[in-house]
Amino acid sequence: MNKAEGVPYETAVLILLTLSRGAESRKKILSALLPGPKNCNQLSRETDLDWWAVKKHLISLMKENLIKSSAFGSSKFYELSHVGDEVIRALQSSNGKNDLKFQGDQP
C-alpha cells in the first residue's frame, strides 16, 4: 500500500493499522517501539508474536515509512520514524476510533 497504487498515504496507513488482517499485531509492534529501538527478538518476546510474523510486519511498516532500521554489529534494530511516532500516538489517543488526525490535516 503506497502512493504508487493511487491510495492516499493517510488512507493506506489507516487501512494497514485498523482494517487489514494483522492490524492489531502491527499496532502492538509500533507501541512496543515507543520507548526506543528494539531488535526482532525483543519485539517478538514483548508482543507475544512469532519471530517470523514480527519480521513480516516490520517489512510492511518499513514500506510505509512508519519505522526505520539501523545495524549495530550483526544485529538490526528498529525504531519509530517521525511519522510512525505520530501515527501510533494518534491511534492510542483515538481509543480505537477510525478518525485519526495527522498534524498535516486541515481542520
Image: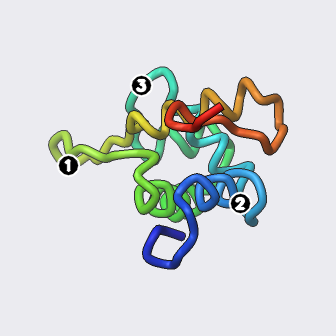
What residue did someone put label 3 on? 36
Where residue 30 sits in the image (x, y, percent)? 56, 39
Crowding near pointer 1: few (<14 within 10 Å), some, many (20+)?
few
**What is the secondary structure assignment of the residue under circle 1?**
loop
Where residue 36 sits in the image (x, y, percent)? 42, 25
Where residue 58 sits in the image (x, y, percent)? 48, 55
**First in sequence: mark 1 vs mark 2:** 2
- The amino acid beneath tag 1 is Ser
Left or right: where 65 falls relative to 33: left
Crowding near pointer 3: few (<14 within 10 Å), some, many (20+)?
few
Residue at mark 3 to residue at mark 2: CA–CA distance? 22 Å
- The amino acid beneath tag 3 is Gly
What residue did someone put label 1 on? 74
Left or right: where 72 falls relative to 100: left
**What is the secondary structure assignment of the residue under circle 3?**
loop
Q: Specify the quadrant of the image occupied by residue 7.
A: bottom right
Q: Nearer the viewer, mark 1 or mark 2?
A: 2
- The amino acid beneath tag 2 is Gly
- Residue beneath the point at 51% across and 78% down: 5
Left or right: where 18 falls relative to 68: right
Where residue 46 sits in the image (x, y, percent)? 60, 35
